[in-house]
Image (cartoon, helix red, strand yellow):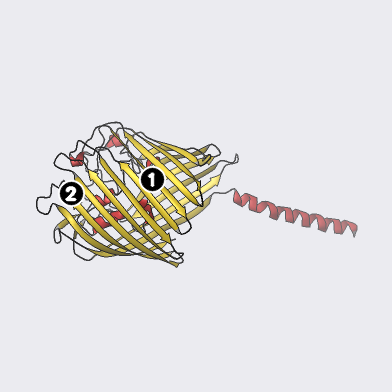
């Protein structure tokens, strides 16, 4: 009997031990995750150019033709796939893919249908990363540090200010992209293939650097293999986060160096370019205030001898499920035919219904002073846009 009891006890101990090792084996396997969002907007705009044909920026829709003063509906969505794990040595790693639905910003090299609504789905970003006590390294197609290490007033609102381009005629006389799209953007390298390093955050400080071998290189196609830009570029970023009195402050900035003969947004060759921006955010209780400043360098589409500079400032109040925000953006492009000035005031309100569903509305007051517009001298008007978004 003693032998029998000992055998039963030994078997029970082995069974418990086996159950105890199973979670450890499972935890060593990579984790998979899917997330994303979908948002749809409807609105109207009225301005001095009412009734004129708008060659708007197809940010949220493939077809770039619409009329100012006409009811318009646009939508956009992304699905993100993530995998992450940890090596036997303790180093963390991850892989990230972002698929975009109805993305007119997809690579248009050699595609005559680009901008006509033909591109319905594409992989916008794809990269692999590694992290440890030494920092983080990212390899592949992803926004660089100059873009990711920045936060200004436009981050306070629940609709991107660029959305206005799809409801109002904010085009310049050059026929370039709508001015609302510029927001506080600088001439960065977007999702070009790059190598990025982020330092650990020490005493609130973190630095980052991105090296881009070829600006128009994306995915499996090098820039030198297409009619694009094969010049390298560099992005730099610096961030500090900490407490100041009863609140928290976040100061971040980034810079981009284009080495020469870069392409602007309409495919015109430019010389070497240096541009930068900084932003500060302060939060205390339900209130947040933010401001930013940019110098986007010389962009050839404005045929300018000077820079594109701009600033924004804003305030937001978070009441729990609802939030309101007010921002103002002012941008100036120094042009040989006369400076182009853009003023944009935006008031937004949003309500969180729970479960990932949010409704929002925005009121826009805009004023484009464009010397190249011989008829109206620009466009001055208002717009209202309603939206609903789902995150999962």
Q: Earlier in the sequence, mark 1 or mark 2?
A: 2
| Residue 350 in view of the camera | yes
Helix, strand or loop status at disc 2: loop
- Most extreme residue toward the right is 1
Question: Residue 11: x and y, percent?
Answer: 78, 56
Q: Nearer the viewer, residue 75 or 218?
A: 75
Please state if 340 lies on the left or on the right of 74 as rendered: left
Helix, strand or loop status at disc 1: strand
- Name the residue tied to disc 1: 279
User: Residue 61 sits in which quadrant?
Assistant: bottom left
Q: Name the residue located 36 percent from the left edge and 51 percent from the top edge.
A: 153
Q: Quadrant of the C terminus?
A: bottom left
Please state if 376 lies on the left or on the right of 385 as rendered: left
Q: Nearer the viewer, residue 355 or 374?
A: 374
- Name the residue tied to disc 2: 172
In the picture, the disc for residue 53 is: none
Q: Nearer the viewer, residue 289 or 375?
A: 289
- Find the distance from the CA under tag 1 to the CA under tag 2: 27 Å
């Amino acid at each position: 009997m003693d032998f029998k009891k000992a055998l039963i006890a030994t078997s029970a101990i082995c069974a418990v031990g086996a159950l105890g090792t199973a979670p450890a084996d499972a935890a060593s396997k990579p984790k998979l995750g899917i997330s994303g969002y979908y948002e749809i907007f409807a609105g109207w705009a009225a301005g001095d150019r009412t009734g004129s044909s708008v060659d708007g920026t197809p940010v949220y829709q493939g077809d770039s033709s619409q009329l100012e003063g006409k009811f318009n509906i646009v939508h956009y969505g992304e699905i993100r796939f993530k995998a992450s794990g940890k090596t036997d040595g303790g180093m963390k790693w991850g892989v990230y893919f972002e698929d975009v639905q109805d993305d007119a910003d997809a690579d248009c090299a050699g595609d005559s249908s680009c901008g006509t609504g033909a591109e319905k789905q594409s992989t916008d970003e794809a990269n692999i990363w590694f992290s440890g006590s030494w920092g983080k390294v990212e390899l592949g197609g992803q926004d660089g540090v100059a873009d990711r290490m920045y936060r200004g007033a436009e981050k306070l609102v629940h609709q991107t200010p660029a959305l206005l381009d799809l409801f109002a005629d904010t085009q310049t006389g050059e026929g370039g992209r709508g001015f609302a799209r510029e927001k506080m953007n600088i001439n960065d390298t977007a999702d070009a293939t790059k190598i990025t390093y982020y330092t650990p955050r020490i005493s609130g400080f973190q630095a980052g650097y991105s090296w881009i071998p070829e600006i128009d290189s994306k995915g499996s196609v090098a820039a030198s293999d297409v009619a694009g830009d094969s010049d390298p570029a560099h992005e730099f970023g610096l961030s500090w986060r900490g407490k100041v009195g009863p609140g928290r402050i976040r100061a971040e900035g980034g810079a981009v160096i284009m080495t020469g003969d870069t392409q602007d947004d309409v495919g015109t060759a430019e010389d070497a370019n240096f541009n930068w921006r900084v932003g500060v955010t302060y939060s205390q209780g339900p209130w947040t205030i933010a401001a930013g400043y940019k110098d986007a360098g010389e962009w050839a589409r404005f045929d300018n001898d000077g820079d594109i500079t701009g600033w924004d400032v804003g305030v937001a109040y978070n009441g729990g499920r609802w939030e309101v925000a007010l921002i103002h953006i002012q941008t100036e492009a120094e042009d040989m035919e006369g400076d182009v000035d853009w003023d944009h005031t935006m008031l937004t309100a949003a309500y969180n219904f729970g479960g990932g569903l949010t409704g929002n509305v925005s009121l826009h007051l805009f004023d484009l002073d464009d010397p190249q517009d011989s008829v109206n001298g620009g466009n001055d008007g208002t717009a209202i846009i309603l939206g609903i978004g789902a995150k999962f």
